[in-house]
Image (cartoon, grey):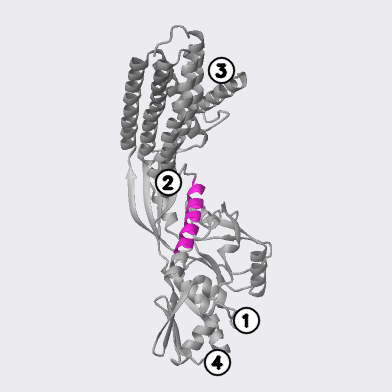
Amino acid sequence: MLNFTKFKITTIYFILIVLSAFAFLNLISNENFIVNKKVNLGLDLQGGSYLLLEIDTDPLINERLQDKVVAIKKFLKKNDLDYNSFSLKNNLITFKSKNENKVKFENLFFSKSNNSINPYIDQYRAHQFDLVVNEDIFKIKFSKFGLLSLNNAAVKQSIEIVRRRIDDLGTKEPTIIQRGEKRIVVELPGIKDPSRIKSLLGKTAQLNFRLVTKKDNEFGSEKMISEIGEEITVNKKIIMSGENLVDAQPRVDNQSSQPIVSFTLDRLGAQKFGKVTLENVGQRLAIVLDNKVISAPVIREAITSGNGSISGNFSFQEATDLALLLRSGALPTPINIVEERTVGPDLGRDSIISGSISLLIGFILVICYMFYKYKMFGLIANISLISNLLMLIGVLTILEATLTLPGIAGIILTVGMAVDANVLIFERIKEELKTEKSVIHAFDMGYNRAKITVLDANITTLLATLILFFFGTGPVKGFAVTLGIGIITTLFSAYYIARHITSSYVLRNKENIKL
């Protein structure tokens, strides 16, 4: 029946009031307000920067293959497989062996069942390596599946580190998503000059500590140029990497008054650092960042506290950025910026004005038509429509969603669908009034019998929005979010708010009802 219990009425208007309150938060500029939530404007509405990044996995592939070199050599010796000319280049491990060793090598090394024979099988099977043999030349490389797995892992890790770096700068509501196999889209609303962010994203930030040496050793050595132009020979053996860093902060050195970066190590890192510094007092320790020596101080005493500092010719800004890079962690692969766009605030303002005018014109036309067509019940439908928009914006505010032009299109479409639900209900009520003598019963049956049609229309659209959300990207997801939420608020406003107002009016004026 059209009667509503007091509990149901209270619940309906409590939800409406709460969501409307959140919607009105967007008109309050005071950030010290009790609840500081707002709908954020996307890149196309407030302007900002768009960056398309691409990871370079060649160094990572080479690194992963390098990790397997010792394991393969041990395996060949253990199984009495003679080999020579072992090398790693062009993302291939190659060596020469007798052609008749191919079957034995494949059966032992790539077997899926002989774990007792080969302890390295699991890691190779997991990475999906392929073996190619041309006469006496054996080649081991990543398979297509292995490369895909490597790329996906590298992209996901890169996205997380890029997010940490951007968040550390205080950038509000960045959008960072994967696009394709190796690319990452970064949208920075409100950022007009992304030069600092680009410089931070362009650094891999692979930090390691190595001893400075004057003679070659079993690990080998290499020459590097320091920040001040000094040629330094460093040991290839890495004493400790940036993975052992817990925190890094910019500081000003009390003695030199120069900016430095102080760092804190985890327990394992502190043990390693303490042991190395204890055994090498008087020697120089090179601090290498992305294959460049940024500092090479002399070890004065053992450092066992797990705390240290990196000094160099830093400005305070450079020290701050270096600390940020170390805190966020090293990127697994180098990143290249392949596309960059900047959207000016004027263009975004024009988009907001155009979208608002479109919404306002559509809203006014719908209100006028409904009032002309259904008189008092058209007014009720319009009240329901306004409530629907307030609830929609309220939910978006609670979620702190980012509104884009496609999102505005979703709101405009919601207005049309909300009216459509009321039209279906009112037309069904007209049909019931022709056969029913009781006005109250006619309205009740009209709402009940139109329910299936309204639900079918909205649920099928909701399913389409779910598909758009899970398989779409960027603007498509924005459209799906606003339209999906709009469908839910439409059903609520039509079958609770509009129905309650209609029932109150019908029960009071049942003798003079016209539709």
Q: Can residue 29 be seen from the camera position used here?
A: no
Sort mark 2 into few (<14), some (14-19) or many (20+) by Cα contacts within 10 Å. Answer: few
Residue in the image at 45% along x and 29% along y:
490
Which residue was labeled with disc 3? 3
Q: Is residue 71 above or below residue 514?
A: below
Q: Is residue 83 left or right of residue 211?
A: left
Most frequent secondary structure within the magenta stretch: helix
Comparing 11 with 3, the one in front is 3
Q: Residue 366, image x and y in percent? A: 34, 22
Amino acid tagged 1: Ser
Q: Looking at the image, tell me whether mark 4 or mark 3 is earlier in sequence order.
A: 3
Amino acid tagged 2: Ile
Which residue was labeled with disc 2? 467
Q: Looking at the image, tell me whether mark 1 or mark 3 is earlier in sequence order.
A: 3
Task: Report the disc number at residue 116.
Answer: 1
Q: Please give the range of residues in magenta.
A: 151-169
Report if residue 154 lies within the magenta region.
Answer: yes
Q: Is residue 256 left or right of residue 44?
A: right
Task: Check if mark 2's residue and mark 1's residue have beta carbons within 8 Å.
Answer: no
Q: Looking at the image, tell me whether mark 2 or mark 3 is earlier in sequence order.
A: 3
Amino acid tagged 4: Asp
Q: Can residue 387 be seen from the camera position used here?
A: yes
Q: Residue 203, image x and y in percent? A: 44, 59
